[in-house]
Image (cartoon, rainbow, N blue to C red):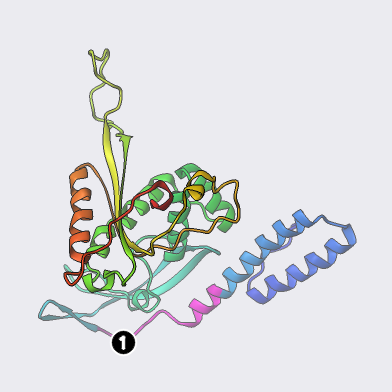
Amino acid sequence: MGGQSDPASGIEAFSELERFLEDAAQTHAGLGELERESERRGREMVRLLLQSHVDARGNADVGEAIAVLDGTTSLRLAYKRVRSRRIPTVFGALKLTRTGYGAPGQRTVYPLDRELQLPARTYSYEYQRRLIRAVVCSPFDEAIAFIAELTGVSVPKRAAEQLVREAAMDFEAFYSQRAAGEVKPSRGEILVGAIDCKGIPMVKPERALRVVRRGKGQKANKKRMATVAAVHNQAPVVRTPQDVLDSPICDRRAARAPTATAARPQAGVGEPHRRQGHVHQRRQGRDEKARPAPPAHLGDRHRR
């Protein structure tokens, strides 16, 4: 900050931002420079305000001991200690001081972690959410660089890969717990089933032996089938032969396809027959016995 000391509070950071903008008017700074510097200073200002907020909430010292339930047994945790924790957020890193309660052979419990709903991992939930969304849209290296530029906080690639794997663990469990009654099609809607497969090369583990010369028919990387299946409700789309011939790219006035509702996707690597069974099972479970369901129409325009 031009040789000056870093601001100690959000108010000081705001004052420095005001002074920077006043000086920028005298030096005729460009808009790009103003945007970048204002973003950096503004992010630091919000981080300091957030740090002041968590400091004001204390360290959650609730007494000499706490009692927790371990199944049906009540455990008394009387060994108290104060520890600090660093939490990288979308505004920068925060330092939290919290009181922990433990006992010999028991895991330490921090009441402040529950009060603030802190993640088990180092990074805040909002930072993880943005990182995962960026990884879904682009390669790991590009996503990490983009989030680092956006938040000022960088994450190692291995940690990012682990976060993405953990985020995908509850995919099938989430959709399997949804009630079947929520996905009954309304009268006039059709049932649409879509399956898409893609062969993906599998990375060999480092301990795998290197083959000096591959035999006939052997390939450097073995592929497995990644399959995504989905069943959803949708209002039927009536199209004329001319609508089919006309390209929707050229005709910007073409009506958009209706939004899919009550989608039940499923994805996985290997065992594509399980995804096909998922589509068949959902369609059977969603058909009403009182009347025959309209036929399902599949097309590239309506695939998800």
| Residue 17 x %, y % | 74, 68
Residue depicted at 55% across the width and 77% down the height: 52
Q: Is 99 inside the magenta-drawn segment?
A: no
Q: Quadrant of residue 87?
A: bottom left
**Nearest the camera: 199 or 61?**
199
Residue depicted at 66% across the width and 68% down the height: 7
Range drawn in magenta: 50-65
Residue depicted at 43% across the width and 45% down the height: 157
Residue depicted at 18% across the width and 49% down the height: 274
| Residue 204 x %, y % | 28, 31
**Disc 1 residue crowd, few under 14, some 14–19, many 20+, Cα 10 Å:** few
The image shows residue 207, relative to residue 196, as above or below, that is above
**Nearest the camera: 269 or 54?**
269
**Element on which disc 1 rests:** loop
Q: Quadrant of residue 190?
A: bottom left
Name the outermost residue toward the bottom.
63
* Quadrant location of the N terminus in the rendered image: bottom right
Residue 207 seen in the figure: yes
The image shows residue 151, relative to residue 226, as above or below, that is below
Name the outermost residue toward the right.
26
Mark 1 sits on what residue? 63
Q: What amino acid is found at the position of numbered circle 1 in the picture? A: Gly
